[in-house]
Amino acid sequence: MSTVKRGLASASAGAVRSSVPAVPLPGASRPMLRLPTAGGSFAASGLLAPALRRLPGAASAGRAALRCLASAAPAVAAAAPAPPAGVVQKAHGFTLTRQQYVKEYGSHVLMYTHDKTGAEVISVLNTDENKTFGVVFRTPVDDSTGIPHILEHSVLCGSRKYPIKEPFVELMKSSLNTFLNAFTYPDRTCYPVASTNTQDFYNLVDVYLDAVFHPRCVSDRRVFEQEGWHYELDNKEEPLTYKGVVFNEMKGVYSSPDSVYYRVVQQALFPSNTYRHDSGGDPEVIPKLTFQQFQDFHAKYYHPSNARFWFYGDDEPVKRLALLDGFLSEFERRPVDSAVATQALMHEPRTVTEYYAAGAAGEEGGEEGGAPGGGGEAQKAYVGLSWVLSDTPLDVETELALGFLDYLMLGTPAAPLRKALNDSRLGAAVIGGGIDDDLKQPCFTLGLKGVDPADADKVDALILTKLRELAASGFSASAIEAAVNTIEFSLRENNTGSFPRGLSLMLRAVGAWIYDQDPFTQMQWEDALASFKSKLAAGGDVFGPLIHKYLLDNTHRVAVRLLPDSAKAAAIEAAEKAELDRARAAMKEADLEAVVSNTHALKELQETPDSPEALTCIPALKLSDIPKTITKVPTASKALADGATLLGHDLFTNDVLYLEAAFDLQAVPARLLPLVPLFCRSLTQMGTATESFVELTERIGRKTGGISVYPFTSAVRGAEQPVSYVMIRGKAMGGKAADMLDLMRDVLLTARLDDKARFGQMVAETKAGMESGIISGGHSYAAKRLGAQRSLAGAVGEAMGGLSYLEYIRQLAKKVESEEGWQAVKADLEAIRGALLQRKGAIVNLTADNATLAAAESAVADFLAALPAAAPAAAAANDWATSGLLLPRASEALTVPTQVNYVAKAANLYADGGYELQGSAYVVEKYLGNTWLWDRVRVVGGAYGGFCSFDSHSGMFTYMSYRDPNLLDTIESYDGSADYLRGLDLSADELTKAIIGTMGDIDAYQLPDAKGYSALVRHLLGVTDDERQLRRDQILSTSNKDFKTFADAIDCVRGSAGRVVAVTNAEKAGKVLEEKPGFWELKKVL
């Protein structure tokens, strides 16, 4: 349910409640521009559900100040059309106060005011079937107890109209939603939903409105204790502990040095207003929050007079107002003091030093000292400079200009300021991301992690020196042209991926609206862009004055040094224990008995399901609302010369051509597989035979919407050998198809692979990113580790993106320091290219309308003709199965400095459980995650997430937990899953809801480019439309018998075939061995 938005830290502290919290939303609060970036590995695991399309730049955070541009309409209308039918001046207690056609989005935008309460609603009317609703409250804080975050969790745990434990979970089970979540920001809380089904959409809106205005949590202390914090004591002899979902979630956040850095930056930049506190909650402070404070906060801020409402899409506009008034009419207008104070600008820069919890220095796990890239980054500093740019709102053109400046300085690896930091070798990876406008006042933050503390002043000096240089010399015409094309392409494309366009636009508008600024200006960029381009064309100095005013001459600057402290983790644990000991010592016998009693009562409540009769209050669709047949993607397949294949998908894309070219990775020897991800990055980040790295990057920006290269690997059901490809992916306007394919040809055939310094930077960045990632996303590392024990696909994926890959990168960092080592690596890079590139077996996938597809064919033919017919190095037999890629089947504890755990357990249902795939497996898997695992691991156990994943290609069934306070208790919950499923006897209504919820995943909303990509993935995996229809039929006919059949299959996970891998700290891993000798092997990672 919850995503904490941490202002300057654009990475969320949590993620969508209903899924693995490793998938970030596209943008921290406002839609971001997707910029070109190197791709990572992609593992396809959904047989029927659409594959996520990794567009060039989809993994990039983008340039925050360009968010005002990121979700614009694909075309600009010549004139405003007449308002659609149904637009009224007054209806259901609302009065229309403003109406405007926003050409950038092809939308009529109406603003209404509720006469009785003063609540404002923006109603956006267009033809988008993916309807979006949101309600936003201003929720500033004056402490770090995490009240808005805990409240955001709690309001969806039952309400007046829906008096069950968790309506949110019931919606996850039974809705066709395309988005269902809630966000906590430093100064506001958002509750958005989206669906393409109109009745489902209104059902979601009704549940959310009742939740925020009439939640059970303000009258039931047990909800507050479950989601926030409580003392836990099973008996008087045990030690007292804290338990609570948000408490443990934030322990995970505070275990991440990256998150700690951004928190320190925000607090240093804003020492006098609400942003100096942590709205998500500081684990040391959360237990100070009282239930009375919690109740008072809701009463103060969750009122229509403090709310902004948003509707978007193709539903009937008056219906929206009627639905809202049904809730708002109960309230009266009243003043709500929720304004966010402006931070006064400082007159002098200052320096702030803080510490993060690091592992013990000098031990195994790659933490020895040494130069950046050669080990030791985990023990080094985070160093950076940050500014608050203004104490008054910026106009749209200034925002746009700063966005262009930000992109020019930092938007690509070749951008001069980013490149200067990388080239300096002062640190391992760039941090900060430049301009960020999540908060009331825009900020700029930039630095390096993996810095020797003695070099901190050098980092500051480098940033300031480079800014002075750029202010004086400006940017090349080529760089500016590339920036303009990249930004305009994103505007016209309007591709928000799986994130609803309406929500992307809402978050942009709300960013001004909640500060009492004009939300309409945030949706209109065309005139400002034209004006800005005119200034660029006139040749004046546009960027130099901006650099001086907002950065060089701006005294509101903070230098942050975040230093490692190997004793901090133990000190945090000791302080928590001491606080609990003090609390226990202050308790009388009756108090202890009350805590024990409350612990048992809360667990009993958590473990007692709602009755079937109670659950009928949740509105649901009928099976008859679900289409019986699959949706097919139009696909034309054409055999080309030398065994190449051309796939074309005739879909409207507004003259954008999406292209993937796939080259079989099977000819690459196993020993080189860990080098493949860096080979892919090298193709676009070292230049070509005729262009420098900077020149190539600028040509990509001028001619395309982005190009990326990355490996793709997946198991194939019934086959030992995986499918594995290197993908080069790009997008361009149809008229530039030949330019894009020329670029791809040059990148593949003539890319330089001999830039030792640049390669060393990429190694250091990869190492730093993975060492951060295993602390914040340990569940994915644990799951990959288990998958690598059972299938070649899993082993290949782990070798290119798991712990084995991190170990390889650590060795590679040392290897490339010597000239002999670098020459060997360079030869290996060329060997990969020699084995990979050939027309034989190549697949080109095109998505566009028929005219664009036809026009691109000749350019595709020229591209393929430039490749060797067959690669000489590809003649050797594939050695993957005999090379020891598969990991030994063992349970492991991967130890890192962390306050929380990530626990995974898995087995192979095909090999170990004798299971034969049925479509019902998707229904049972989702139901199990949303019931037993949710209740036992999250609600009772206090973890932020508990879920399961069934890879129907490999047969791997994996349990995972996220930010979990437990280890063995969680495993015990996993082991109870089969018995839980056997004991179910679902009613017809419950079965229908489970099926519909699964169909919501299977039929997930897709933009045209994603449809074309899904068709490519199915082609690679041999999944036919006939098989998709068969699985759909099986899903729709799922019965109670199927639940018991699946229970028998997953029994193997708790049996001798099951293995456990957990990311935890050394102390907790050791305690497990004390309780269960030989349970697992310890492996120190950090």
Image (tube, grey):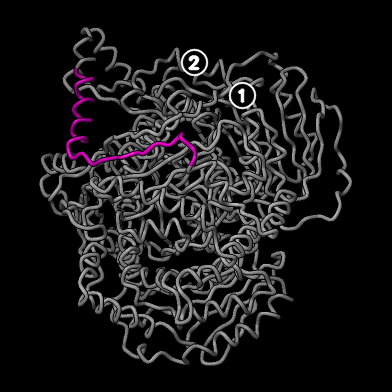
Residue type indicated by callout 1? Lys
Give the residue displayed 51% in from the left and 26% down from the top. 344
The residue to which callout 1 is attached is 161
Of all residues, the one furthest to the front in this rendering is: 472
- Quarter occupied by residue 111: top right
Label 2 vs 1, first from the N-terminus:
1
Q: Secondary structure at mark 2?
A: helix
Q: Which mark is residue 295?
A: 2
Q: Nearer the viewer, residue 520 or 312?
A: 520
Q: Nearer the viewer, residue 932 or 132?
A: 132
Q: Nearer the viewer, residue 296 or 69?
A: 69
Depicted 1007 relative to depicted 133: above or below: below
Give the residue displayed 62% in from the left and 44% down from the top. 399
Q: Position of residue 742 (x, y in %)?
A: 57, 80
Residue 576 magenta: yes
The segment highlighted magenta reads 553-581
Residue type indicated by callout 2? Gln
Q: Residues within 10 Å of mark 2 (few under 14, many from 20)?
A: some
Depicted 685 relative to depicted 538: above or below: below
